[in-house]
Image: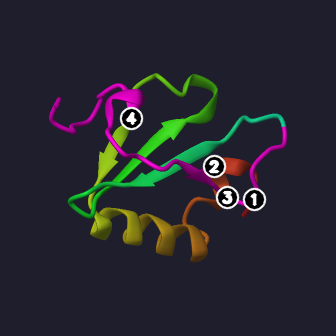
Amino acid sequence: MEPVTNGIRATSIEHAVWRKSRRSNPSGNCVELAVLSDGGVAVRNSRYASGPALIYTRDEMAAFVQGAKDGDFDDLVGRG
């Protein structure tokens, strides 16, 4: 088994159950996440399901989600 590190092929992550937001684009252009066995989170682009995955700790993902809720990234999508 290949170690799970940043840039690993998403299809190489054993037992990954990928999921996307209810708000994702119906055409399939979205970000998918999977919880890893060590508690980390893998992120991939749904258009390139076998492409690379980025790996984050739970704390990193929690900080990102809180920043999104707080509007920290609104300027990146033309809001704020």
Which of the marked residues, 4 or 1, is nearer the chain's N terminus?
A: 4
The residues colored magenta run: 1-26
Decide whether residue 20 is among the magenta residues.
yes
* Mark whose residue sits in front, 3 or 1: 3
Q: Which residue is mark 1?
A: 79
Compared across the picture, whether 40 is left or right of 75 comes to: left
Q: Residue 23: x percent and y percent? A: 77, 58
Q: What is the C-alpha distance between the residues marked 3 and 4?
A: 17 Å
Question: Is disc 4 placed on a helix, strand or loop?
Answer: loop
Which of the marked residues, 3 or 4, is nearer the chain's N terminus?
A: 3
Quarter of the figure with residue 75: bottom right
Q: Which residue is mark 2?
A: 76
Q: Residue 19: x percent and y percent? A: 58, 52
Contact, mark 3 vs mark 1 (Cβ under 8 Å): no
Classed neighbour count for the residue bearing mark 4: other residues with Cα under 10 Å, few (<14), some (14–19), many (≥20): many
Q: In the rendering, which numbered label is found on residue 49?
A: none
Question: Is disc 1 placed on a helix, strand or loop?
Answer: loop
Of residues 5 and 36, the one nearer the viewer is 36
Q: Residue 43: x percent and y percent? A: 44, 45
- The residue shown at (44%, 52%) is 34
Quarter of the figure with residue 37: bottom left
- Is residue 35 shown above or below 65? above
Disc 1 marks which amino acid?
Answer: Arg
Q: Main secondary structure of the magenta part?
A: loop
Please tell me how many numbered marks the rendered image carries: 4
Q: Which residue is mark 4?
A: 53
Which corner quadrant holds the C terminus? Answer: bottom right
Which of the marked residues, 3 or 1, is nearer the chain's N terminus?
A: 3
Disc 2 marks which amino acid?
Answer: Leu
